[in-house]
Image (cartoon, rainbow, N blue to C red):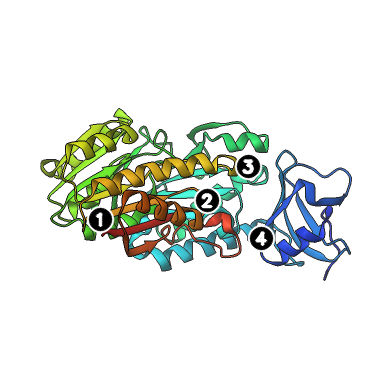
Amino acid sequence: MKQQRSFPAFKVSKRCENRLKGGHPWVYDNEIEVSDEGVENGCIADVLSPKGSYLGSGLVSLNSKIRVRILSDNANETFGESFFRRRIRYALDHRKTVMGDDISACRLVHGESDGLPGLTVDRYNDILSVQVLSYGMEQRKDMLYRLLTEELAADGVALRGIMERNDVAIRELEGLEQGKGWYKADFLPTAPESPVTEIIENGIIYKVDVENGQKTGFFLDQKYNRLAAAKLAKGKKVLDCFTHTGSFALNAAFGGAAHVTAVDVSQFAVDTAKANAERNGLSDKMDFICADVFDLLPKLTEEKAGYDFVILDPPAFTKSRKTVNSAERGYKEINYRAMKMLPRGGYLATCSCSHFMTNELFVKMLMSAAHDAGVQLKLVEARQQAPDHPILMNVPETDYLKFYLFQVV
């Protein structure tokens, strides 16, 4: 270390040392071998090797199995306001580069990938929808929100409001309460009366409810995957399963599909998708079904419904390693049914948004489903999440979305 340290310290196991040196930012509670007394929840702490060499500093979470989330391995860093301002500026500048004109509706901060663990910030024009998922970030959120407001203002973006979407169970593992609502501060205008705003993605207008919509209001990570699917949809009869607010279906219709059927088990989702179709003048080439996809696919196969492009964008079937096997069965069922329904030469778009369903497992499942369906899969394209959800290559948890386009032959 280059200077006298004022932070409390943890000595960790050799295994943890090796992982941190490899760039992974987490220290688990069972990897701490020696701890200073009186370490406060949410504070900054140094992490040391078994021999006492400096490995990095991070935010402490005393209630979580992830005991420390590393912020930096710079021994001269003091972690004041200037540190967090730099991190926010780096994140914003990266989105300017990778998103270009699409920056008005994108993820601005993606947790560990942007060196701000436990912080998610999505922008919907002049509204931010934010999730704070670690105790240390919760303690610093007032500063972080102000810095976000100031740095966006420097880019010419005047915020109307910041919606906190902290209605997620993972906060309880941090000892934090769940909740949602407009954040109030003197550096923001009076909160908007309505949580509904509009965005434009791939030329399509969507209403986004930042308070009641899923996640932070909209699934931004599939932006360019929807565009890739739309390029295959021209002239085809398309079935979009798990449509949610209709995003893949709308892209297909906008891309020139002959007809698109959008399916979701939620009537609210179906109504929202229908309203989005009307808003974009696409209702005449779309219809909507409220049904369970698992029940509907076998029925459509029996009816020989004649779809030649099926899109499968299911919710995460697993959020832990314990349920991967049952999730794999669910993924296989819908993919098998889609492959059985499609004619030879038809197209399939399929994906998984679960980190625990690894790409290796997902591909293995697809090959098994194809074998059972008596077809082969010709790869058109393999894709991941949009670049505003950056993947940190030495942090596997940031690599979660698998998206494949196939021709069934």
Q: Quarter holding the C terminus?
A: bottom left
- Under mark 2, the amino acid is His
Q: Which residue is mark 1?
A: 347
Of badges 1 and 3, nearer the viewer stands: 1
Q: Is residue 116 left or right of residue 216?
A: right
Numbered mark located on residue 24 in the image: 4
Image spot of residue 263 (x, y percent)? 27, 37
- Callout 2: few (<14), some (14-19), or many (20+) C-alpha neighbours within 10 Å? some
- Under mark 3, the amino acid is Glu
What's the residue at 89%, 64% (across, down)?
51
Q: Mark 3 vs mark 4: which is more N-terminal?
A: 4
Q: Mark 1 vs mark 3: which is more N-terminal?
A: 3
Q: Mark 2 vs mark 4: which is more N-terminal?
A: 4
Q: Quadrant of residue 100?
A: bottom left
Q: Which residue is mark 2?
A: 355
Relative to residue 23, is residue 264 depicted above or below?
Answer: above
